[in-house]
Amino acid sequence: MKRFILKVLTLVFILFFGVLIGMQYANEGMMKMRGYSDPSFEQPLSLQEAAPGEVEASFLGNTLSTHDLEVKQKQLEEVKSFNLFSQIGKGLAQFITGFIQGILSVFGGILSLVS
């Protein structure tokens, strides 16, 4: 089952990047066909160096930056909404961690008695 999921995810990523490459190739073909660069035809994916050490990216005409992500993260932290599945996952993780630590401490105690 793991191999199947891995194969499917690999295929999805390959096809996704294939679509992006195809969009870029079609954009270049449209520019060649027209004979001049039209600003209405934006590149699907572009990376530019804004400042030394900083990279600015745009995806389908939308500019992506780390500042936008930080602002969105702060907004999500301010909302402090209750997510049932998140709480269940945290509780389950704490339970499993405690359970495994208990088992390891028991085995550690048994091993210290044996040696």
Image (cartoon, helix red, strand yellow):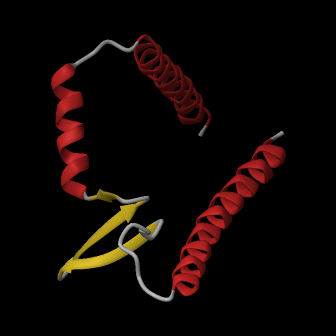
Q: Residue furthest front?
A: 34
Above-or-below relation of 105 to 28: above
Residue 46 percent across, percent down from the top left: 40, 72
Residue at 25% x, 59% y is 65
Tell me which corner region of the image, top left, top right, bottom left or bottom right, holds residue 114.
top right
**Left of 38 or right of it: where is 115?**
right
Residue at 51% x, 81% y is 31
**Left of 106 or right of it: where is 62?**
left
Above-or-below relation of 64 to 113: below
Tell me which corner region of the image, top left, top right, bottom left or bottom right, holds residue 10.
bottom right
Q: Quadrant of the C terminus?
A: top right
Foreground residue among 53 and 30: 30
**Left of 35 or right of it: where is 21?**
right
Above-or-below relation of 38 to 40: below
Tell me which corner region of the image, top left, top right, bottom left or bottom right, holds residue 61.
bottom left
Q: Quadrant of the N terminus?
A: top right
Foreground residue among 86 and 94: 86
Residue at 76% x, 56% y is 11
Residue at 75% x, 50% y is 6
Residue 71 percent across, percent down from the top left: 17, 42
Residue 19 percent across, percent down from the top left: 65, 62
Foreground residue among 96 and 114: 96
Above-or-below relation of 83 to 66: above
**Left of 101 or right of it: where is 65?**
left
How many discs mark residues in the rendered view? 0
Residue 24 percent across, percent down from the top left: 56, 73
